[in-house]
Amino acid sequence: MPAARFCNAAIGLCLAALLLSCQAQSPRATSADTANTSGGANSGTAASEPPLPAKLIPDPPRKELSIVTVKSVETLYDDGKHDTSNDAIAVLQDPTVALKDFPLDRRQQVNWVKALDQGLIEPRPSLTGKGEMLVMDMDILFTNTKDMPHVRFPHLQHTRWLDCSNCHPKIFIPRRGANPVSMNKVLRGEFCGVCHDKVAFSLFICERCHSVPHAGSGKWW
């Protein structure tokens, strides 16, 4: 019992000594910090941060273009794809000018099918413009959509500007039941997702694909 009391007393003395040591050091550190802070404030530039080193390769100056206004090339500067230091950018047509009269969808993106129907664009059958498009008017209905409306895939709108080889057989095997399409795969860039949400309309305009209601689909839109 005396040994236990002795150990407890020794531990108590050690903790007290440690606490006093911390309290003794804290004011000095605080005073030193305060002195440094106040000294820096009073001495102006004496305690200011050192200047940052100059860039080894400075940014090129932004060129002012005299052929077109800055507003008309604004998106070309901001799209991250064009060399904005090259004066040749002035001869490019800004997308906001080229597409200003095109029909838009509810996400404010160009509705290319309507643009095609309205004759605003006329896709070439080849790079040289020679030849004819193989247009096929045939719909494929995807019914494995659970409580979502069925998906109608129209060949007509696609083959008016795409060759069959763009999709078959690499993306879609032209055989019934050979393509296990799912929204997870589409959202990951497979099947329809190879083009849609990239160069074709957004995957989040659901009603453009899920356009055929059925008994179990209810009212979505």
Image: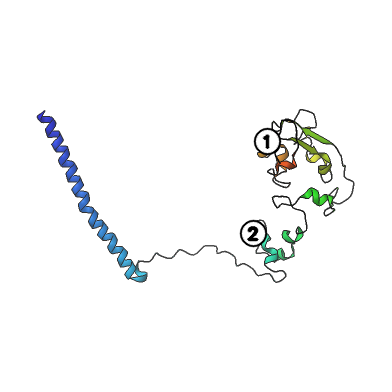
Q: What residue type is labelled 2?
A: Asp
Label 1 crowd bin: few (<14), some (14–19), many (20+), radius 10 Å:
some
Q: Is residue 119 above or below residue 51?
A: above
Is there any visible trace of residue 142 in the rendered image?
A: yes
In the foreground, 165 or 116: 116
Is there any visible trace of residue 123 in the rendered image?
A: no
Q: What residue is disc 2 on?
A: 78
Of helix, strand and loop, which one carries label 2? helix
Drawn side of residue 20 relative to residue 70, left or right: left
Q: Is residue 175 above or below residue 118?
A: above
In the foreground, 82 or 120: 120
Label 2 crowd bin: few (<14), some (14–19), many (20+), radius 10 Å:
few
Of badges 2 and 1, nearer the viewer stands: 1
Q: Which amino acid does label 1 sit on?
A: Met
Q: Where is residue 174 in the image (x, y as percent from the top left)?
A: 80, 32
Q: Where is residue 135 in the image (x, y as percent from the top left)?
A: 87, 42
Drawn side of residue 152 relative to residue 56, left or right: right
Q: Position of residue 131 (x, y in %)?
A: 90, 47
Q: Where does the N terminus fall, quadrant-wise?
A: top left
Drawn side of residue 128 relative to residue 73, left or right: right
Q: Residue visible at 24% across and 53% down?
A: 26
Q: Residue visible at 33% across and 66% down?
A: 40
Drawn side of residue 126 relative to residue 87, left or right: right
Q: What residue is disc 1 on?
A: 183
Q: Where does the C terminus fall, quadrant-wise?
A: top right
Q: Position of residue 117 (x, y in %)?
A: 84, 50
